[in-house]
Amino acid sequence: MTTLTRILTLSAILALAGVPVQGGTYTFNVDEGVWDDADNWIPGDGPPEDGDTAIIPINKTCRVEDDDQAAKIIQVYGTLGLVGHDLELHHSTWTSTIDGILYFKEANGHVPELHFIAAPRSREAEPSPRKGSTDMGPA
């Protein structure tokens, strides 16, 4: 069995077992362009999707303007523009970095939004109400 076959087999087993598999890392590689275009990312099988890391280097401008997008982590050192579409970041313990410019521009009547969506906590991890308390926390 080749190393690649072993890696793919292990990834498939982990996915079937419900163990999260690390997403890919994509670097925006043109001076200015849109998120949707796979040719704008290295490796060229982009664009990043939910579970992936998107890096926008300094002096690069990436626009989310064709469809809503999702990723696990963004690292913005250049410019990221949300133009009439949303970006969702799905993470639990990962950190996104915006050390560049992030702008929002209304288009087609939609003001774009950036959503940070943490992984849900298990019910066992939530504190139980104190004995005799009627306060069940926020609704």
Image (cartoon, rainbow, N blue to C red):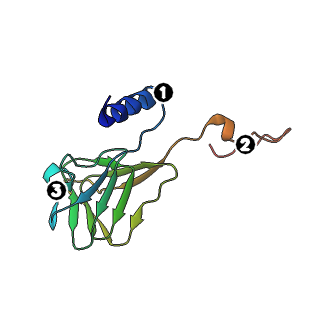
Q: How far apart are marks 2 and 3 (CA)?
A: 46 Å
Q: Mark 2 points at which residue?
A: 127
SS state under label 3: helix
Residue type at tag 1: Ala
Q: Mark 3 points at which residue?
A: 40
Nearer to us of marks 2 and 3 is 3
Measuring from the top left, give residue 120's x and y in whole percent: 54, 41
* Residue visible at 21% across and 60% down in the picture: 63
Q: Quadrant of residue 83?
A: bottom left
Q: How far apart are marks 1 and 2 (CA)?
A: 28 Å
Q: Which image quarter is the N terminus in?
A: top left
Nearer to us of marks 1 and 2 is 1
- Taking 14 as reference, is 1 left or right? left
Q: Residues within 10 Å of mark 2 (few under 14, many from 20)?
A: few
SS state under label 2: loop
Q: Which one is in front, 46 or 8?
A: 8
CB-based contact (under 8 Å), mark 1 and mark 2: no
Residue type at tag 2: Pro
Q: How far apart are marks 1 and 3 (CA)?
A: 34 Å
SS state under label 1: loop
Q: Mark 1 points at which residue?
A: 17
- Taking 71 as reference, is 66 left or right? left
Disc on the earlier residue, 1 or 3: 1
Asked if 34 appears above or below 78 in the picture, the reply is: above
Measuring from the top left, give residue 6's x and y in whole percent: 36, 32
